[in-house]
Image (cartoon, rainbow, N blue to C red):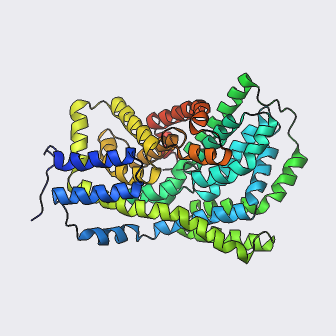
Amino acid sequence: MYKLYAASTSLGWDFYGPALGMGIMILLGVPIWVVLGLGTALLLSVTEVMPLTLIGETLFSGIDSFSLIAVPLFILTGDVIVTTRMSEKLLNLAEATLGWIKSGLGTSTVLGCGFFACISGSDAADAAALGRITIPRLVEKGYPRPYASALVASGATTGILIPPSISYIIIGLTLGISASTLFLAAAVPGAMVLMTIILTNIIVNRFKRYEESSGSFSPKKFVRAFWGARYAVLVPFIILGGIYSGIFTPTESASVAVLTAITIGFGTKQLRVSDFPRMMERSAEVNGVIAPIIGIALLLAQALAALEVPQSFVQGITNFTDNPVAVTLLMLFVFVAAGCIMETTPNIVILAPLMLPLAQNIGMNEIHFCIFMVTALGVGFITPPLGLNLFVLSGLTGEPVLKIAWRAIPFVLSMLVVVLLLAFIPWLSLWAL
């Protein structure tokens, strides 16, 4: 007979013991999917809230979702864009658009990150692909390598914030919300983060004088760059245009995007059949990290739901305070702290079902909550100790992670300002509803 838990029942060491063990394993650097798997198995064994025999079935059913097919397809689309050098064309377009202003190359780099985010849906892919191209240019222009790395790492956070975003697909799957709705809602917040990072770079550059670009906008140069990037621009146009117009779902748009990118690659003779094994391998490596985490984290989420942990959590918080401002700030702290120590996917699958009831308790719409949560977690990509983008750029440049993180502080602060605006101005997330 399996135990029944009530929301009013205080959680004991049969819950806190496994949770503490998971925390210790995370601090020791154990791979997150192993931490979640062992922690969930121990939790189920101790609490007996669900039979252990359901683990295998739940793992497979958790990732057996049509929506999740979009994840590897968007990752593969990003790989095709890089292999065919269309990413360089997007950067050239970004430079022709904003490169004429002061700090133009830095500003263009961030805009290029935003362009690429409209294709890949992944911040790590954004950071790796564009970092190789832009950092040598930035250093040559006068930017210190650590700051150039911090700039690219910050710009690449838009990979999960600007649609089509893998994170919004995952949180939509977890909470049962349409990814198309989330993509539409995320358009303004994603653009806000992008513009804030650009503005921060302009301000920093004004004081540090890394770059003294000046000139005037050249329509001829812009037209030439746009024509050179016409095929690269076509891919995000198809993805977002198809989704927002309702022609196809995010998963279908990912399929169309892959086929379009491959067709363009062969048509421009920038893609060969021999490129496919390596592209498929890279995409499989990234997806191989994401899929197990999703499957195991969904199992943990089911166990927590069966233990009525979300209800207990909400009850505990509301007993402490029911002030909407205080609760919102508490959620912000939890999201940023979680983003500092754990990757976005497990954070979403574990924390979203836990925090949504708390958000709804203070009157926050579920769409508003999703935008707020994902944007807050995005800050974690440029904050130690995890800071995935910091590690990606450190690997590319050889600069110490903490040195890059120090230069990223202005961008962290500017992103937090955007998160606070999103938290307390619901219209920014609900404008399309």
Determine the residue positioned at 54% across, 30% down: 413
In the displayed structure, 330 sits above or below 246; it is: above
- Expressed as whole percent of the image width and height from the top left, the position of residue 361 reads 29, 41
Q: Is residue 365 visible to us here? A: no
Quarter of the figure with residue 33:
bottom left
In the displayed structure, 215 sits above or below 1; it is: above
- Expressed as whole percent of the image width and height from the top left, the position of residue 358 reads 30, 42
Q: Which one is in front, 152 or 68?
A: 152
Residue extending farthest top: 207
Residue extending farthest bottom: 273
Tell me the quadrant of the picture where the N terminus can be found. Answer: bottom left
In the displayed structure, 110 sits above or below 406; it is: below
279 left or right, relative to 299? right
Determine the residue positioned at 42% across, 48% down: 29
Determine the residue positioned at 27% across, 45% down: 20
- Expressed as whole percent of the image width and height from the top left, the position of residue 193 reads 59, 40
Quarter of the figure with residue 250:
bottom right
Residue extending farthest right: 220
153 left or right, relative to 318? right
- Expressed as whole percent of the image width and height from the top left, the position of residue 316 reads 22, 37
Q: Is residue 180 visible to us here? A: yes
Determine the residue positioned at 41% across, 45% down: 369
Quarter of the figure with residue 197:
top right
